């Protein structure tokens, strides 16, 4: 039966069901239990935002609090994955990847290829990303393009609770390393989720709204803002097709190109800064393969090329919002050469 | 663990195989037959073999740039290794890894590693897997004096203690991290003291002395198997060749490697001891030498004759190509 | 004067989008004629005329989203004045209040029942009378009867269930044979204390229904086979495997399109619903197990004619003339005594593509009003 739960609950349920199904699944990270070695309660936190709350009681030693030592425990997750476990490591904020990037970029990503196809590294790195919580420059970034750039890594960013559960289960069952991005601003999003286990294949974008006038290609929290803009624009007679990339690696090129070919007018919305980004990548893809279908220049709505600011008045401008997206769509829709 | 005659002959055969392999790669590289970077282990054989004699196939090791010796001692197929160094389809990694990335997970060898300090976190993971699965397997991270200064090594030693992991850290201190002396680069006086700071027992041994390494490793691995947590061993050793093949080694005092080879060679020391006191005849060792020479000859000639990977292989073994 | 209103297709439907009018204002229409296309969260389908007459007003604009029960148009005789029509529409709209969300949730909702180790989901609509049970086909579920269930339940209790391995029933199917699926349906009838029912089966469900009717004729008051398997050899090659193994939209869409005469009925939402089902753990294995028993070397291996020969009751056979999965030619040359209804321009899903006609003949069949 499907019932309505939050994205946070969907992630917890995916971990719970996979740990119940497969004893080789372990979870490790900073405070994923919370309270280890302390005199108060165990499972005091269940993750900094409570995503893993309750799993310690069920799975005990398979829930591992780590010291704040990302390169050791992300590397240990990779090594354990190459030794028969299916670890889910939590890198609390994706901004922290700077201190453990080698383990992801040179080790996990490369084993399968570098060892001639004779190694599997079924590790999942769950990590929070995104701005909007006044968490400032080192806790608010959206660095998925950096990971997407690396051959051998799979990059997933669920937008709905349904997708979060199915994509995380897929990530855990997948034999390649997966970076699973969770937007802080989406944890409380509600949606219908089946109680049963299910998995969603990677590399299939989701057309979350159909329309024939303008394509909005987006990912993560920006999908919600794109939908908000599309709703406003529908009232003005502009029908937008909104595509949620769902995974940036592998990337569903076909759905992006089909949508661009259908509308001929494209806006790409990305929360990250504009250079070497998912937005530029998508626009290059369309320019390469759907050039003849284009009726207007591709428009990019992104963050500026600055760190994420703290003060509300600054951060609110930093993040693309529905109004900016709508303005970009209007300009693309009205473009005539 | 008492060493039987068979153990000793096996140890000798492994050390000799490593030596012969490296000497031959040195020659073939100089002749222009081998491409890329190679880092030779000649001179350090007793470290790998002294540790590996305690390990089973299910135990796991992680290695360094200088990985050939660890591979051979852990049981990776020698002709496949040679073929890998030649970039052949028949290589351990089907020609996709090369000297710096030879791996064989089925043999418990988690890879030579092109990143200094890349291995210790991986070994924490292998040891964690053994612990979670309730086996008595252990993980051994080989590092050099260079990696001994990496944060990953420090973090891994700490994590191994925190989680009481069946992990052993073996530092092969050959005196130079690339061209910089260990004496310069290691802030603490001793690697062993540093390891003790992470809460684990540490030993310092002569890395040319198979018996010293074997004894220290035996104690460390016993502790690990019995659930008593990690240990650290520093093996002080000489490398006979440069950091990589082609290194003129002008940073070393003239004659340093030659003197080590002449006066403190692990194979000579081993042969001297076992023929004097273990009831092994020189002829038995000579037989091994001949067999090993034939093995390496065969490995080189088959590697030279083996096919390169199909050109289309550059797109395989990755989940997607664009 | 009759109001043409936004229909309610299924329990969760609260609104629909008017996609396209199919008939001009002023045209003569027969009862059951398709007047306009409406799209819901689940499906795109045609709204049929509630009466014969003239479509006097197209009230709903194309592209508009309207709640269930909202006025779409007005059907009336040609001699009714324009003023009267306008007055009728104005009064209707003034008095119309959309069904509140709370009320929408109050209707019957699916239940689960345990049958021999299976948890089966079913939906009951209507009360009393001689009950009917609707059995879907391979890969389907109780929602396949979206356009029939409520209409059929006017005179009786009508149960639609999810077969083992399907919908929200448990995914263990045992050996997956028609016989064991039929046992599950019999167990379902036992659990719900239904001694005898009008049994309707679609496709694979037809073979299941025939199995039950042949084996326990006293439990089956009447039998209906819609595009049933088991009456001939041909079967669309690759369909079962294609359906069982597809994990992606691009793989499943052409498979689903083969089910309908009009491929436009396969909307993105329909595809998504099927994919959501297919992604559940155990579904692929369940479908593979069932498929194994149905087709070999491209031909059907299930045959139900012998079973039918032992069933003395009324049999109705319905087929879409353009069925690509199981050809309508299988409805030709059936033993005497069956009523056969072949519907033009309809594919393998006549109960969806020609729901009004199917509902009409089913109701008559249940009452024994059809002649062979």
Image (cartoon, coloured by chain):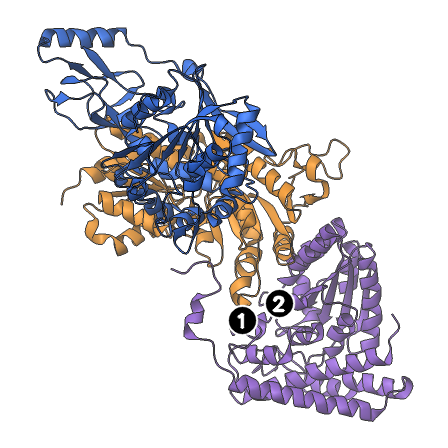
Chain colours: A orange, B purple, C blue
Q: Is residue B51 above or below residue B135?
A: below
Where's residue B44, x and y in %?
Answer: 72, 78
Chain letter of disc 2? Answer: B
Same chain check for tags 1 and 2 = yes
Q: How many marks?
A: 2
Where's residue C239, x and y in %?
Answer: 38, 48
Helix, strand or loop at label 1? It is loop
Query: How many neighbours does mark 1 have within 10 angstroms: few (below 14), some (14-19), or many (20 or more)?
Result: many
Compare residues C312 and B234 and report the one nearer the observer: C312
Chain letter of disc 1? Answer: B
Helix, strand or loop at label 2? It is loop
Q: Quadrant of residue C274?
A: top left
Q: Residues under labels 1 and 2: Cα distance?
A: 10 Å
Find residue A9 and name its label: none
C315 left or right of B203 in image: left
Where's residue A49, x and y in %?
Answer: 58, 33
Residue at the (53%, 68%) spot, across then down: A116
Where's residue A76, x and y in %?
Answer: 65, 54
C34 left or right of B194 in image: left
A161 left or right of B177 in image: left
Give the residue number, with chain letter if any, for mark 2: B111
Residue at the (56%, 80%) spot, across then down: B83
Compare residues A82 and B171 and report the one nearer the observer: A82
Give the residue number, with chain letter if any, for mark 1: B97
Q: Quadrant of residue A40?
A: top right
Asked whether the beta carbons under mark 1 and mark 2 sit within 8 Å of each other, the answer is: yes
Compare residues A77 and B4 and report the one nearer the observer: B4
Query: How many neighbours does mark 2 have within 10 angstroms: few (below 14), some (14-19), or many (20 or more)?
Result: many
Residue B24 shows in the view: yes
Residue at the (64%, 69%) spot, across then down: B64
């Amino acid at each position: 039966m499907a019932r309505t739960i939050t994205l946070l609950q969907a992630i917890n349920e995916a971990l719970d069901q996979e740990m119940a199904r497969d004893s080789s699944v372990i979870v490790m990270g900073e405070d994923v239990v919370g309270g280890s070695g302390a005199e108060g309660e165990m499972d005091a936190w269940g993750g900094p935002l409570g995503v893993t709350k309750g799993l310690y009681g069920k799975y005990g030693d398979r829930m591992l609090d780590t010291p704040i030592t990302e390169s050791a425990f992300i590397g240990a997750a990779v090594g354990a994955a190459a030794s028969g476990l299916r670890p889910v490591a939590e890198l609390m904020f994706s901004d922290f990847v700077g201190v453990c990037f080698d383990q992801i970029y040179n080790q996990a990503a490369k084993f399968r290829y570098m060892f001639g196809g004779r190694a599997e590294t079924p590790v999942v790195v769950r990590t929070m990303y995104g701005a909007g919580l006044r968490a400032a420059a080192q806790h608010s970034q959206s660095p998925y393009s950096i990971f997407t750039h690396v051959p051998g890594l799979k990059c997933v960013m669920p937008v709905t609770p349904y997708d979060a559960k199915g994509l995380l289960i897929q990530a855990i069952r997948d034999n390649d390393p997966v970076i699973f991005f969770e937007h802080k601003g989406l944890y409380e999003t509600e949606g219908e989720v089946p109680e049963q286990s299910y998995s969603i294949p990677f590399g299939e974008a989701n057309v979350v709204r159909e329309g024939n006038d303008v394509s909005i290609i987006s990912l993560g929290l920006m999908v919600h803002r794109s939908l908000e803009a599309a709703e406003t624009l529908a009232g003005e007679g502009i029908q937008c097709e909104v595509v949620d990339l769902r995974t940036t690696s592998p990337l569903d090129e076909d759905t992006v190109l089909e949508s661009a070919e259908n509308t001929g007018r494209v806006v790409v919305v990305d929360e990250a800064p504009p250079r070497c980004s998912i937005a530029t990548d998508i626009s290059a893809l369309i320019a390469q393969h759907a050039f003849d279908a284009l009726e207007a220049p591709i428009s990019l709505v992104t963050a500026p090329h600055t760190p994420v600011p703290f003060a509300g008045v600054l951060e609110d401008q930093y993040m693309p919002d529905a109004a900016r997206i709508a303005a970009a769509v209007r300009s693309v829709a009205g473009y005539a050469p | 663990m008492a060493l039987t005659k068979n153990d000793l002959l096996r140890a000798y055969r492994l050390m000799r195989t490593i030596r012969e392999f490296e000497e031959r790669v040195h020659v073939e590289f100089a002749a222009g037959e081998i491409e890329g970077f190679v880092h030779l282990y000649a001179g350090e054989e007793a470290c790998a073999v002294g540790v590996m004699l305690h390990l089973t196939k299910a135990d796991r090791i992680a290695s360094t740039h200088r990985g050939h010796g660890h591979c051979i001692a852990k049981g990776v197929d020698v002709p496949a290794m040679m073929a890998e160094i030649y970039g052949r389809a028949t290589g351990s990694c089907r020609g996709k890894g090369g000297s710096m990335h030879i791996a064989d997970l089925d043999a418990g060898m988690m890879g030579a590693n092109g990143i200094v300090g890349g291995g210790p976190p991986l070994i924490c993971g292998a040891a964690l897997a053994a612990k979670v699965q309730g086996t008595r397997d252990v993980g051994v991270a080989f590092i050099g004096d260079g990696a001994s200064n990496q944060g990953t090594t420090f973090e891994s030693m700490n994590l191994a203690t925190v989680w009481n992991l069946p992990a052993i850290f073996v530092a092969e201190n050959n005196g130079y991290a690339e061209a910089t002396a260990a004496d310069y680069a290691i802030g603490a006086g001793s690697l062993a003291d540093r390891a003790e700071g992470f809460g684990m027992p540490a030993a310092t041994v002569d890395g040319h002395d198979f018996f010293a390494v074997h004894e220290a490793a035996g104690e460390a691995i016993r502790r690990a198997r019995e659930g008593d947590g990690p240990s650290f061993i520093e093996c002080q050793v000489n490398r006979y060749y440069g950091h990589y093949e082609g290194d003129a080694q002008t940073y070393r005092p003239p004659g340093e490697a030659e003197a080590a080879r002449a006066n403190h060679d692990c194979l000579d020391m081993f042969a001297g001891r076992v023929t004097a006191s273990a009831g092994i005849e020189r002829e038995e060792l000579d037989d091994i030498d001949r067999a090993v020479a034939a093995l390496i000859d065969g490995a080189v000639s088959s590697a030279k004759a083996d096919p390169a990977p199909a050109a289309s292989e550059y797109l395989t073994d990755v989940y997607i190509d664009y | 004067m009759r109001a043409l209103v936004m229909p309610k297709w299924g329990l969760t439907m609260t609104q629909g989008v008017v996609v396209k009018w199919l008939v001009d204002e002023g045209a003569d229409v027969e009862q059951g004629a398709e007047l306009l296309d409406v799209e819901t969260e689940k499906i795109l389908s045609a709204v049929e005329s509630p009466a014969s007459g003239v479509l006097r007003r197209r009230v709903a604009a194309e592209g508009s989203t309207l709640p269930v029960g909202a006025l779409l148009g007005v059907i009336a005789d040609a001699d009714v004045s324009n003023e009267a029509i306008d007055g009728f529409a104005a009064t209707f709209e003034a008095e119309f209040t959309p069904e509140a969300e709370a009320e929408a949730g109050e209707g019957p909702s699916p239940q689960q029942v345990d049958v021999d180790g299976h948890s089966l989901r079913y939906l009951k609509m209507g009360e009393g009378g001689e009950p009917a049970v609707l059995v879907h086909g391979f890969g389907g579920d109780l929602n396949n009867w979206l356009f029939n269930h409520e209409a059929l339940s006017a005179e009786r209790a009508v149960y639609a269930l999810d077969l083992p391995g399907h919908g929200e029933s448990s995914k263990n199917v045992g050996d997956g044979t028609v016989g064991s699926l039929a046992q599950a349906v019999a167990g379902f009838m036992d659990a719900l204390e239904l001694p005898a029912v009008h049994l309707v089966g679609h496709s694979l469900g037809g073979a299941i229904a025939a199995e039950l009717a042949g084996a326990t004729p006293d439990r089956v008051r009447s039998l209906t086979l819609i595009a049933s398997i088991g009456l001939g050899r041909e079967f669309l090659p690759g369909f079962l495997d294609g359906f069982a193994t597809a994990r992606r939209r691009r793989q499943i869409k052409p498979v689903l399109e083969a089910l309908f005469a009009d491929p436009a009925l396969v909307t993105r939402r329909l595809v998504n619903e099927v994919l959501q089902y297919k992604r559940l753990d155990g579904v692929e294995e369940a479908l593979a197990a069932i498929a194994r028993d149905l087709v070999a070397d491209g031909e059907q291996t299930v045959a139900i004619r012998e079973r039918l020969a032992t069933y003395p009751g009324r049999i109705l056979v319905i087929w879409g003339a353009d069925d690509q999965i199981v050809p309508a030619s299988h409805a030709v040359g059936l033993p005497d005594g069956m009523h056969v209804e072949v519907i033009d321009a309809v594919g393998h899903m006549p109960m969806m593509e020609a729901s009004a006609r199917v509902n009409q003949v089913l109701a008559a069949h249940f009452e024994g009003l059809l002649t062979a």
